[in-house]
Image (tube, helix red, strand yellow):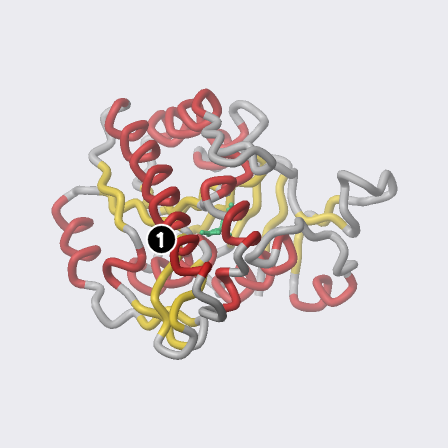
Amino acid sequence: MILIKLGGSVITDKTQYKTFARERTERLCGEIAESGVKTIIVHGAGSYGHVLAKEYSIQDGYERPEQIEAASRVHHDAMELGMLMSQTLLDIGIPAASVAPGSCFVMDDGRIAPDNTEPIRAMYEMGIMPVTFGDVVMDRKKGFGICSGDQMMEVMADLFNPERIVFVSDIDGLYTANPKTDPDAELIEEVTEETLRKVSSTSNVDDVTGGVRGKMEAMLRMCNDDRDCVLVNGTVPGRLLALLKGEEVTCTVARK
Ligand code: IPE
């Protein structure tokens, strides 16, 4: 099984509140189906999550009453995107069920406590693809917080032990600097803890869950001797399909 995260930057327009990138999402789901590889999908919230979460600092936990309505709105919007994702998958014949992380798990000071995994495992064993996502989740210490899709990737990797982990984003991989603003930025094809230390911390997207660097740190935690973690550009048609078929593609691979 391959665990795939479809980043919010590929399935939504991250700059416009609640804009679903329908065509691109349909193409990517089509590539996953065409590959014939058994997969589990996690997705980001993109502009269904980050815009409002940032405005009301939901990631910092409960601080003031106005956040209550905003937290419930962000959750509602993230669920809406979850529905769009499961609809897209069902339409191409993949039996998928959207699972909000906050319906199974709570967080403890920003970390998911995966103590009720039975519903997700049972779905998978039945042949239903559990599709989970970045969302607002209640937190024992902070009241609520943001559980990113990347955090859910770590939970799903522990639960299902995938042979490979793929992050689909809107960049070719990790760069030495931000490729959108720095023309000298170079693609790093293989990242280790050593190389990450040398990467500029400005090669980051301005979002509430840590951007590319945070993703790389998560990827390094998830790879092991038998499993690599790959960051690939989903805006290039056919690239995800080629990767899933085991072909060489432009990407960054995280290795222990
Ligand atoms: C964000 O999840 C969750 C919310 C802001 C509600 P992610 O951090 O995984 O989303 P993307 O992939 O960056 O959009």
Query: Extreme bottom residue here?
Result: 141
Q: In the image, 99: left or right of 170?
A: left
The image quadrant of residue 155 is bottom left
Nearer to us in this view, 35 or 13: 13
Q: Residue at x 48, y 24 (%)?
A: 24
Percent position (x, y) of residue 65?
A: 43, 65
Residue identifier under label 1? 72
The image quadrant of residue 214 is bottom right
Percent position (x, y) of residue 223?
A: 50, 61
**Relative to residue 107, is residue 171 depicted above or below?**
above
Secondary structure beneath dot 1 equals: helix
Percent position (x, y) of residue 20?
A: 45, 29
Q: In the image, 26: left or right of 116?
A: right
Amino acid on which the number 1 mark rests in the picture:
Ser
Q: Residue at x 34, y 66 (%)?
A: 138
Give the class, few, some or many, for how many residues have Cα within 10 Å of label 1's Cα (few <14, many ≥20): few
Q: Residue at x 46, y 59 (%)?
A: 66
Q: In the image, 205: left or right of 99?
A: right
Query: Extreme front residue here?
Result: 65
